[in-house]
Image: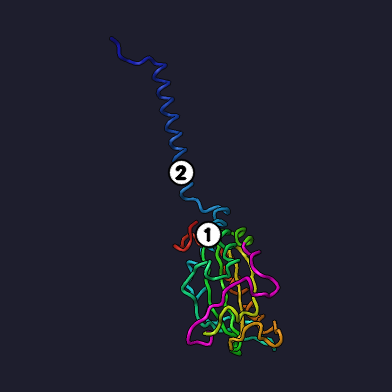
Amino acid sequence: MNSARPWPTLVAASALTLVCAVAAGVAGSAAGTELTRGPSTAELHAAAEREIAGRWRNWPAGRVFPATLPYSAEQGGRERAGRIGISPHTSCEDAVDAAAARALRRAGCKGVLRATYIDALRGVLVTIGVAAFPDELSAVRAKAAFAGGGRPVPGLRPLAFPRTVADRFAADVRQSGSVRQAGPYLVLTTAGQVDGRPADAASEPRPAIFAFGTEISERVLTRLSTPRMPDCTSREWQC
């Protein structure tokens, strides 16, 4: 019996082999191109957003809260607020008043960092809090839970440090507060006087003496939320 394949069958088989080889070559070329191409614009933007959202957790505490922060003095000129301490705790609920804590929880708060600063004249204390969220929309929603117009309640709880000038910085000392939002962050402040006088004991409201707190908190927020160009060759980035 003749076992040779008919000529048309051989032609078809050869053509099929050629088609498969070409397809494999095209697929391999496409895969190689995909592996060697640089990141797209969309991928770079996504990497930048991920890097910003992770700064509160990835940056050293001293980078989030520098040892000193500049501000405009009430009498003119420039002064620097000095950092007294940074809290090692990041609980969302423990850092703010109960009413605000519920809003943070609903918005998916990931953590709150806090540090306390003192003004150059060493008369006013301010605690700055950085609340981190999954995305910008979550931070915007949470912002509505905090008091506006300079009122401290409901707001950030003050951070006291025993055996320092901030050892009497308790909740009833709060006289001013602020809230700002950018990207996936809220930056909150609460301020009071070093002598520990309750807010209702203040003789005459002097909002100007607390204004530096908002100014230095905006510096913290700007550093945290400002995008920078991804460097996909660095281990710091995920492009």
Q: Count all numbered tags in the image, as a single digit.
A: 2
Residue 199 screen position, x and y as percent: 64, 82
Secondary structure under badge 1? helix
The x and y percentages for residue 9 are: 40, 17
Specify the label residue 50 is tagged with: 1
Of all residues, the one furthest to the top in this rendering is 1
Q: What is the x, y in percent for residue 101?
A: 57, 65
| Amino acid at the residue labelled 2 | Ala
The residue most toward the front is 200
Q: Which residue is drawn at 48% across and 61% down?
A: 237
Q: Mark 2 points at which residue?
A: 31
* C-alpha separation, residue under disc 2 versus residue under disc 1: 26 Å
In this orientation, which residue lies closer to the viewer: 89 or 78?
89
x, y percentage for residue 81? 58, 84
At numbered mark 2, what does the secondary structure look like: helix, strand or loop? helix
Examine the rendered structure and indicate whether residue 137 appears above or below residue 161.
above
Look at the image and tell me in which quarter the N terminus lies. top left
Amino acid type, callout 1: Arg
| 115 or 168, nearer to the observer | 168
Tell us which disc is closer to us: 2 or 1.
1
Query: How is the protein colored in the picture?
Result: rainbow
Q: Quadrant of residue 14?
A: top left
Neighbour class for label 1 at 10 Å: few (<14), some, many (≥20)?
some
Q: Give the range drawn in magenta.
A: 142-166
Asked whether 88 or 105 is in front, the reply is 105
